[in-house]
Amino acid sequence: MADLLNTTVSGLTAYQTALTTTSHNISNVGTEGYSRQRVELNSRLPQSFGNIHVGQGVNLTDISRVIDEFTTGNIREFSSSFHRLDMFGSFASRVENLIADDQGSLMPALDEFFNAMNDVANDPSANAPRVALLGAAENLDQRFQSLATEMQKMEQEIDDRITYEVGDINALTTEIARINDSIARIGASDNQPSDLLDQREQLLKQLSEKITVSVVEQTDGTLNVLVGSGQLLVTGSHSVNLTTMADAEQPDRLAVAVQSSSGNIDITNNLTGGEIGGLLDFRDNLLDSAQNRLGRTAIAMAESFNNQNVQGYDLNGNLGGNMFSSGNPEVLPNINNNVATGVPTVTVSDATALTVSDYRASFAAGAYTITRESDNTVVAGPAAGPVFANVDGLDFDFSGVGAVAGDSFYIRPTRNGALGFQAQITDPNAIAAASPIRTTSNVANIGDSSISTGTITDVTDANLLDTVDIFFDPANPAGTFDVVDRATATVLQNNVAYTAGMTVSQNGWQVQLTGAAVAGDVLTVEENVGAATDNQNALLLADLRTQQILDNGTTTFEQSYSALTSEVGVVTQQVNINRDVEESLLNSAIAERESISGVNLDEEAADLIRFQQAYQALARVIETANTIFQTLIDVT
């Protein structure tokens, strides 16, 4: 009867544990990351009695997690991809809303400015259109600066978010290492506590939302967690912290590094997933380009309007000045430079040739090399320098730099263009709407020769405003003319053969002659005195709206901004589409895990009844065994 009791007690113990496990499952039906646990029962070895074998009950061999490792790995992978795209898409949508807003974008300000310029051209002597133009110019510079400032704030926000995320990652890896230690202390890798394993897996999922990691299981049941190109974040019970540091090439922004005894190891370029990956992707692949493209538009606009306005005459009788200023190229020395002194001077020499890329200037073997970052193309050098002229519209001057081998400089030519865009004219009369020269035909001319209004080719020419006559001197050979300075009677060009439609250039201006000239005819170029109603230069300023200036003369200002809007919109749409795909894959993987590992209350309720009935039946067996045992005692 002892065998009957032992057999029954083994069942009672087993099913009591089964009931407890079922209760544990039901209690954790709402616990995120919980894996359903299942008791593993095996019959005991039978006892031999002659040629028969009598069973001895049941053994509870294990309480196991119901999991699928492949599905768990998919959840981490899809979670990392989704959170990267979700973070990228969130910031990209903010940029899109910023630059495409009907009221707050650049386009309304451009429309207002060019419309005001047309009004000045239509009535150059009136004060009201000039005042309105100054107001529109101020609104334009505020719009450029506002857009650039908001993007700059996003850049700072990214640094703040990276710092915050790194702190979260360190907390997660510390906790994973702690659980690793607890698991290792238990011992056998094939008999690990299910709840600790669930907690560790949930921490790994949270970690994958921050950063892409790979996981390697060890023989003692612990996990090694790696990041980037194989740097360990967790090994056994030890965790390695991430930190932030100044980026070597662009020290005004943060990089992510692994702390080590030999110093910090920059892993920024190896981070491809999670929220940190999304922040870095947005910064490097969208925000930088958007800032550069906006800045390039501002620089080209300032240069174009300045070049044209200085070729005009204002109501004060002066040559025009600059209408706008813009931000200068920025040069950042690499923080790993050895003993370099000074930085190269970089200036914009041709705004029409500017790209939206940044550049890297490096020094090695006594020569400089300039590389365009957008396509990693060497655009100048290697050469000793010290001056590289008109490289993508930029001049590089290294004459003041004491570089040594390995030194480098990061150049952002257009990043600050919009931040520094500002209207320079405050006096309405200083708008140079007129041409500084005017052309006339002598009323006594016999022929029908005529002279064009003229264009300015060099406003810095000291003799620009001198009165010059184009004189068909009867004493000269037939069909020729002289170009004569009237004040000094100096012949500037002698016996020039005349051809209808020809161009004459002198003193920084250029005119075209047409018609049939007769000896004695005089055509004159002189200072445009009292030209309040002249709108020649105002028309040229207004015409800049349709001039293809950017991208080597293929893109207008408005087209350049539209390209920015389109670029950001396309990238945002693609990111959002890919995010939705990854979210669907993630949800499917989670649903699959739930179907395998999740707690099903109906199933647990059925198990609860089954285990309860087995337990009650075994209790009746105990009563029966007790009765039989008592009867045997009474008989004896």
Image (cartoon, grey):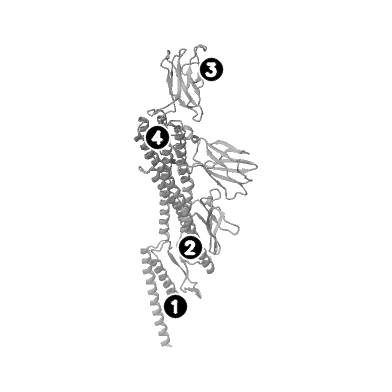
Q: Can residue 380 be seen in the rendering of this structure?
A: yes
* Residue beneath disc 3: 494
* Residue beneath disc 4: 429
Q: Earlier in the sequence, mark 3 or mark 1?
A: 1
- Left or right of 393? Residue 23 is left
Quarter occupied by the C terminus: bottom left
Q: Earlier in the sequence, mark 4 or mark 2?
A: 2
Q: Which residue is at 39% across, 72% downward?
A: 614
> What amino acid is labelled 3 in the image?
Asn
* Residue beneath disc 1: 4
Q: Which residue is at 45% across, 62% downward?
A: 66
- Check disc 3 and report its element: helix, strand or loop: strand
Residue 200 has which mark? 2
Q: Earlier in the sequence, mark 2 or mark 1?
A: 1
Identify which residue, 213 or 382, lies in the foreground: 382
- Left or right of 100? Residue 165 is right
Please identify, in this view, whether the residue under mark 4 or under mark 1 is nearer the observer: 4
Crowding at label 4, few (<14), some or many (≥20) Cα neighbours within 10 Å? many
Answer above or below: position of 405 versus 237: above
Instruction: For marks 2 and 1, give the CA distance.
Output: 43 Å
Answer yes or no: do the residues labelled 3 and 4 have beta carbons within 8 Å?
no
Instruction: For marks 3 and 4, give the CA distance.
Output: 40 Å
Answer above or below: position of 52 versus 163: below
Residue 138 has which mark? none
Identify which residue, 370 or 200, lies in the foreground: 370
> What amino acid is labelled 2 in the image?
Arg
Instruction: For marks 4 and 1, give the CA distance.
Output: 115 Å
Instruction: For marks 4 and 2, give the CA distance.
Output: 74 Å
> What amino acid is labelled 1 in the image?
Leu
